[in-house]
Structures are given as C-alpha cells and as structure tokens.
Image (spheres, grey):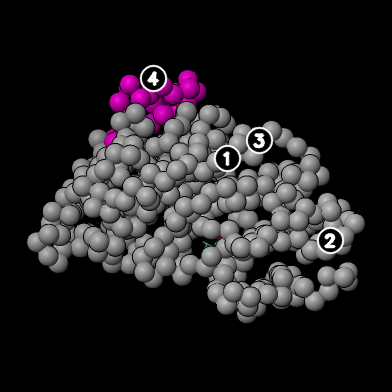
Amino acid sequence: MSEGEGLFHSVQVGDSTFTVLTRYQQLRAIGSGAQGIVCSALDSVLGVPVAVKKLSRPFQNQTHAKRAYRELVLLKCVNHKNIIRLLNVFTPQNSLEEFQDLYLVMELMDASLCQVIHMDLDHERMSYLLYQILCGIRHLHSAGIIHRDLKPSNIVVKSDCTLKILDFGLARTACTNFMMTPYVVTRYYRAPEVILGMKYKENVDIWSVGCIMGEMVKGSVIFQGTDHIDQWNKVIEVLGTPPMEFMNRLMETVRNYVMNKPQYPGVSFSQLFPDWAFPAETEQDQLKTSQARDLLSKMLVIDPESRISVEDALDHPYIHMWYDPGEADAPPPQISDKQLEEREHSIEQWKGMTTPAFSQPIASLQSSRSLPSVSP
Ligand code: AMP
C-alpha cells in the first residue's frame, strides 16, 4: 500500500467491499439503490452517525460517469434542510489512473419513506412530510433542476418527522428537453408527460408528490403499472381519458396509440379516497380530510397545464400551516451551466471533472501520494 496505509480500512458489506477512511467505523448496510450500497457508520472524529454510499463502479460507462458527476456536483452546491447534506467525499485510490470507487458521506436519516408511507399517518404528520417534499423540490426548481424521479425510496425521514430528498443523478436542467429513457423515473410515480414523452415543466414533480400522498392515504401504490405501457392504462382507468385538448399536444405516433385505448370515465376523488381512508379522530380531522382530498384532486391531474404548481401547493390550506419563508423560499443554489454539464465526455474526462469535488484534487496525488477528502 501507499503512504496512506492506515488511513483506510476495508469492511465486507454483503457482496461488496467498502474501503473507507478509518474515521468511519461500525459500517452496517442500510439500503441499496440503482447506484450502489449505503451503510450507516460512526464518524469517530466528530462522534456522529453518518451514511456512507459507495457508488458502484461509477466509471464503468459514460452514463454512470455522468450520473456520478451530476450527483456529486448537485450535492455539493445544494444547501437546504430538505435535501440530504454531503459531509465528505473520498476515494481510496491514489491516482487518476487508478480512480475507480467513489464514496459519499452524508448525514444519516432513520428510514426511507417506503418504510413510513404505509403507516397510519395522522394529518399533522402527513401534511408536514408533504410540505417538506414541496420545499425540497421548490429549492431544486429555483436552480433550474427538475427532479423527475421522486419516489419513496429516494426520500428519507427521521423519527422526528424531518425529511430529506436523496439522489440527483437523473436531474436535468429545466431548459433541456431530453428524450426520456426508461430508467429515468420508477414507473409508479412517473408523470403522464414523462410516460408520453411530452415537454415537461416544474410541476412534473407535483405528480409524483400526488402519487406519494395518494399512497399515504390509500395504503397502496395508486398507479401500479406492470410495465411502461401499462402505467398509462392504470392512470386513465382511475383518472379517466384526458380531453382532446390534451391529446392534440401529443406527438402523432403517441396520439394514435393513446386514442386507440378504450375511453374511461374515471373515478371521483371521493370514491378514490373515501372518508374512511383518512385519519378521523377529531372534528378538526374532517376539515383536514376535505382539504387533503382537494389537494389530491389538484395534484393528480393528467394535464400539466391544469395541474397545481409547486407554489400553489405550498399555499394550499392543507400545507400552508407549515409555511416558513426560510424553508420554502430559500435563496437558490448557485450552480453554473458548466457544473450542470450536459455534454458527452470520455470516461477519463468525467473522472478528471469529478476530482475537483475533492478538497485535494486527485491529480495532485500523483506527486504527493496523499489521500483526497473533503472535510465537513
Ligand atoms: P440511494 O442509493 O441513494 O437511492 O439509497 C438507497 C437506499 O439507502 C435508500 O432508499 C435509503 O433506504 C437508504 N439511504 C440512502 N441514503 C441514506 C441516508 N442518508 N440516511 C438513511 N438512509 C439512507
């Protein structure tokens, strides 16, 4: 090993080896996602628990490299209480040539929203969780980042009901209109404009919030399509076939497909979310229930032109009780176009672009052989 011996230790986590700075002790696997495995750990320097995510082979191809780069840049630029905070980033490798593995150290939360979404949440908790998701996405939108991949597994919560959004690998700037690839959004929470390849704007994320809220109320996924195409079937079976005005905005091939589907009248929101599905312990709950259903009916709207905006959702009576300008209107993160690089690069270029995120550029390691990390 290099002069850095002792600075790192290796721990076997399932099938994966975590080679982390020795300050991170007591690693335990807590989750895994498209990008890799996440462990809880103790930061023995600060004496605090942290989450350590190992990006699995981030430079295996250009798509992975680009996602790793984007996630790192965004995590470093964004500073908001409802977006996970990056505490450290390091690689155990000594040179740009050897650079393989990327570890992100983040604040540790207690659970993903998947573990909470089917619990019996009262109106206070439900509205507070939704408020925080809205604050987080509004903050991203203020920097021109539209998430499009919001889903319970990339939202984490603490037992005190605080909430943070994870994952920016798939976020794109608002101005680019990319062809959507199937992995962009897990299909249950995928907005109609994404399923149908239409232009999207900020309220594409409102659809996902509506799906999450609907799932909290109903206790099960509301649009559980078996595949990409079936996802659209599930949406129209429940919400009804959208009007011609919407159809006219589809690409011709998509329009032909969509218009060949049977016509569905849709189900009313009071049938879809009956009173008994909501918490009803106090008289106040009845008012909250009608407000909650009203908000659902404004978020779960197929046509983005008629769907509520993030700002109006934050102003909605069900949510507004939590409104704090410091959280909802925080100054936008400063992210330059250069940092939100959308162009293609070679893997070596992506590696080189990723290293400035380290406090000590990895390129300088070739001479100094010291190890890179960004201290909190
Ligand atoms: P990701 O790879 O970021 O999608 O994370 C995969 C899973 O790991 C999530 O669904 C969470 O269950 C868990 N996880 C990720 N980051 C954290 C964190 N900072 N705190 C607690 N759990 C996390």
Give whichever of discs 3 and 2 has the lower sequence position.
2
The image shows residue 318, relative to residue 33, as above or below, that is above
Q: Label 2's element?
A: loop
Q: Amino acid at mark 3?
A: Lys
Q: Residue furthest left?
A: 283
Give whichever of discs 1 and 2 has the lower sequence position.
2
Q: Residues within 10 Å of mark 2 (few under 14, many from 20)?
A: many
Residue in view at x 77 percent, y 73 percent:
7
Q: Answer whether labels 3 and 2 touch (C-beta < 8 Å).
A: no
Which of discs 4 and 1 lies nearer the camera? The answer is 1
Q: Is residue 117 magenta?
A: no
Q: Nearer the viewer, residue 219 or 92?
A: 92
Residue bearing mark 1: 335
What whole-number distance in Å separates the C-alpha atoms at marks 1 and 2?
A: 29 Å
Which of discs 4 and 3 lies nearer the camera? The answer is 3
Residue bearing mark 4: 248
Q: Is residue 260 magenta?
A: yes
Residue in view at x 36 percent, y 69 percent:
160
Q: Nearer the viewer, residue 206 or 1?
A: 1
Give whichever of discs 2 and 4 has the lower sequence position.
2
Q: Amino acid at mark 2?
A: Asn
Q: Is mark 3 within 8 Å of ligand 1?
A: no
Q: Which mark is residue 94?
A: 2
Residue in view at x 44 percent, y 55 percent:
82
Q: Which mark is residue 338?
A: 3
Q: Which residues are magenta?
A: 239-264
Q: Nearer the viewer, residue 276 or 201?
A: 201
